[in-house]
Every structure is written in C-alpha cells, then in structure tokens.
Image (tube, rainbow, N blue to C red):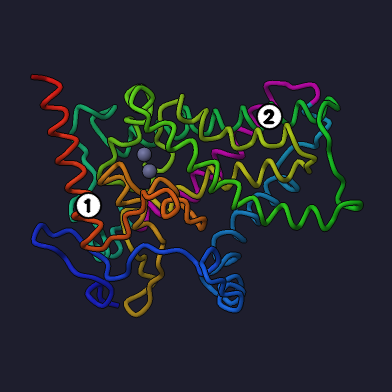
Amino acid sequence: MKEKNFGDRNDRGNYVPKKSVGYPPVFVWPLAPIKALKWVFSIPGYFLPWNLFYVGIGLFSWFVLSPPLEDYANLTIFNFLIVFLKNSGLVLIFYGAFHYRLYIQRAQDIDFKYNPRWPTEKSKQFLFNSQTKDNIFLTFCSGVLIWTCFEIFILWFAAGGYLKLISLDESMVYFISMIFLIHFWRDLHFYLIHRLIHYEPLYKLAHKTHHRNVNPGPWSGLAMHPIEHVFYFSCALLYLFIPFHPAFIIVTLVHAGLSPAPGHTGFERIKTNEQTSFDVDSYAHYLHHKYFECNYADGILPLDRWFGTLHDGSEESFNKMRAKLIKKNQEKCLDKT
Ligand SMILES: [Zn+2]
Ligand SMILES: [Zn+2]
C-alpha cells in the first residue's frame, strides 16, 4: 500500500492527498435519496465504523462500568474517582493505541503523514519542553476532569429527580433514535463553539493552546485550555432541556472525549499491513490546524460549505487561504503604523 497511490508530496515534503474534503450525499440538492441511503449503510458510512463504535463504548461505559443512577444522588469522592478512572481508562486505551502504533512503534514511518516532521520534544512553548507530554497533561488534568464533572453534575441532577428521564421499556424507539442522532448534535455544537472560540479575545485566552499543535498527533485532540474544555463538553447540557436516558449523556461525552483522536493523528491513512490501510478522515481538521480560519466543523453536516468556510484541499482553496492570510497580515501591519 503505497502513499503515492492516494496523494503526492510537495517540494517541502508535505503529503497532499488526491481526494478532496467532501461530505456524504445526504445534504445535497437535488436530493439523492438512493445514494444517501446507500451511504448510511456502507463502510465508511453513517453507522460504521465510528458512530457505532462510540455508541457501543458509551453504552458499555454506562451499563457496565458506571455506578447505578441512585449513587449519584449522594455523591462521594469514591464515586467521583470511579467515573474519573473509567473515563481516563477509555482515553488512555484509545488515544494510546493510535500514539503507540504511529508515534512510538512508528509502524509506517512517515507514510501518509501530512507533515514529515515528528512532534517537537524540545520547545519552550510546551510544558516539559515536549508537545506530547504537554498534550497528555492537558488531556487528563483538564480534559477528562471537566468531562467527568459534566457527567456527574447532570447525573446528580437527574438522580435528584430534577430532570425528565425515560425508561428503556417505555421508550425504546426514542432511545434507539436518539442514541444514533447524537452524532448530529455533536457536529452542530462543535461547529458553533469552535466559531465562538475563534473570536479573537477567546482565541487568545483559550483556543490558542490547542492551536500550538500545528503538527498534530493523537494526543493533540483533547489538548485544550480548561476554558475550552468547558465549552467543548457543554454539549452534555442538552439533557437539561429534553427527556433522556442516562446512557445518552455517556454516549454524548464519549463521542466528544474520544472522537478527536483519529481526527488529530496527523496521518491520512493507517496501514494495517503492507497491502491494506484505512482512511481516518483527518484531512479537513489537519487543514484547520494549518490554516486556522477554515474547516471549523468536523463531521458529516456540511456546515463549512453552508457558511463559506470550507477548505476542500483543492488548489483554488489553497489560493483563497493564502490570499486571506496575506490580507490579514497587511491589515495587522497597517494597524501597527
Ligand atoms: Zn484540533
Ligand atoms: Zn480552531
């Protein structure tokens, strides 16, 4: 499986995929119902591989690993630790697997790696002078901690009888529909908060921490400033307003907590052996880390196309982005004079 079958390296050695950033044939005009339906059930498609994976891990996390709902009514440090360790374990296994394979084993060297350089381990802008160690620190000490606080806060509220809960027996159709529609909510919520934290004061205060990862690796995914983590995991607040099953909160937070890993691998494809590889769909977000003001969304809703912020990887998009950056730098220079 050679990378040149899927893209080329430019004169700086950066890998540029041949495919352009696109969306599934769902939100298109004229409508294409057959194509849309085919996409829903194909691989990759709506369910497989990622959506079903996050739903499965979320359900497992609630029904097998979490304390019963009643325990959340009288919170103890012990229960808090159980939930924190549960979420930390999921993150450690998932992010660790990508990092171990691609950055420790370097199992495919720089094949399919967008940026030919490895993350910096000698830079004063990162804690411990290491991009990876800084990212891991932010992931656990802020990311997983704030994720756990949201999870416990809403479940505590629900256990106290303040929120409308549904039961599996009475609302099976609602349960199954919602569990698979959470993906849409996450897409919309992420786009909105991402636009918001690119507002200059918020960017300087918080989001620039994440954007220090110009050359991202899996641990860059949840490497955010605590303020950004609060915005990011606030997707769980939806359940203050609609009837829900506790599993919805866990699936939503598992989706938010785990999905940044494949999107930040820094690789276009992951090789499973010399003949086969799979696409991790990370190019759109890699371009966001490189050019900042494009591809704010990271999912299946074509929000960047609707709002004119799509960088699809084409020559036209690159030129548009360069012109935008030059204009911005000129304006900054004018401001200073
Ligand atoms: Zn990112
Ligand atoms: Zn950003």
| Residue at the image point whose x is 39% and y is 36% from the top | 223
Residue marked by disc 2: 152
Q: Is residue 15 above or below residue 264?
A: below
Residue drawn at 55 percent across, 41 percent down = 189
Measuring from the top left, give residue 181's x and y in whole percent: 66, 54
The image position of residue 45, as x and y in percent, is: 55, 69
Q: Which residues are magenta?
A: 73-101
Question: Tag 2, which secondary structure?
Answer: helix
Report helix, strand or loop for mark 1.
Answer: helix
Query: In the image, is residue 43 above or below residue 166?
Result: below
Residue 162, given in percent of the width and then of the height, sits at 82, 26
Residue 75: in magenta span? yes
Q: Amino acid at mark 2?
A: Ile
Q: Is residue 245 magenta?
A: no
Q: Is residue 164 left or right of residue 29?
A: right
Q: Nearer the viewer, residue 99 or 231?
A: 231
Q: Earlier in the sequence, mark 1 or mark 2?
A: 2
Three-letter code for the amino acid on which mark 1 is drawn: Lys
Mark 1 residue crowding within 10 angstroms, few (<14) / some (14–19) / many (20+): few
Alpha carbon distance from label 1 to label 2? 45 Å
In this rendering, the answer to whether 231 lies above or below 88 is: above
Query: Which residue lies under the disc numbered 1?
Result: 320
Q: Residue at x 59, y 54 (%)?
A: 54
**Dots 1, 2 in contact, CB < 8 A:** no
